[in-house]
């Protein structure tokens, strides 16, 4: 997968889990994407027994925004 409107740099896909899940839920998808040479990262939102931080909905939104802003531009 390439970003054709900005050149040929690959786009890194950020995989976010749903409720009651963590980044582990994406393991099979990550393997498939990696086999195709598609960069990816699965995240786990803050919560009890997981990553530290604000585990409210607002906290999850901020966490996702922070992670996505760390992505390198193609």
Image: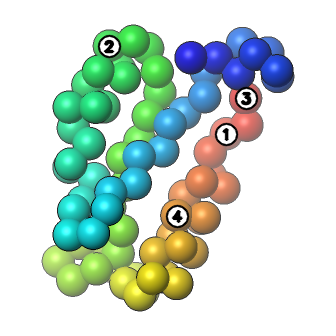
**Residue 42 position (above or below residue 40):** below
* Tag 4 and tag 1, C-beta contact below 8 Å: no
Mark 4 neighbour class, 10 Å CA radius: few under 14, some 14 to 19, many 20 or more: some
Q: Nearer the viewer, residue 3 or 73?
A: 3
Q: Judging from the image, what secondary structure is the residue with disc 4 in?
A: helix
Q: Residue at x 64, y 17 (%)?
A: 2
In the rendered image, residue 48, in percent from the top left (x then y), is placed at 21, 83
In the rendered image, residue 16, in percent from the top left (x then y), is placed at 40, 54
Tell me the number on the disc at residue 35: 2
Along the polypeptide, which appears first: circle 4 or circle 1?
4
Q: Judging from the image, what secondary structure is the residue with disc 3 in?
A: loop
For the N terminus, which image quadrant?
top right
Compute the Cα span from label 3 to label 4: 19 Å
Tell me the number on the disc at residue 74: 3
Question: Dot 1 corresponds to which residue?
Answer: 72
* Tag 2 and tag 3, C-beta contact below 8 Å: no
Tell me the number on the disc at residue 64: 4
- Residue 23 as seen in the image, left or right of residue 73: left
Q: Judging from the image, what secondary structure is the residue with disc 2 in?
A: helix
Q: Quadrant of residue 4?
A: top right
For the C terminus, which image quadrant?
top right
In the rendered image, the residue lying farthest to the right is 6
Compute the Cα span from label 4 to label 1: 15 Å
Along the polypeptide, which appears first: circle 2 or circle 3?
2
User: Depth-wise, is mark 2 or mark 1 nearer the camera?
Assistant: 2
């Amino acid at each position: 997968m390439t970003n054709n409107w900005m050149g040929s740099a690959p786009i890194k896909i950020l995989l976010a889990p749903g409720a009651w899940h963590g980044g582990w839920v994406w393991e099979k998808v990550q393997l498939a994407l990696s086999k195709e040479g598609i960069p990816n990262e699965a995240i786990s939102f803050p919560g009890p027994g997981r990553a530290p931080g604000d585990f409210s909905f607002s906290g999850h939104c901020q966490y996702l925004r922070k992670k996505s802003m760390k992505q390198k531009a193609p």
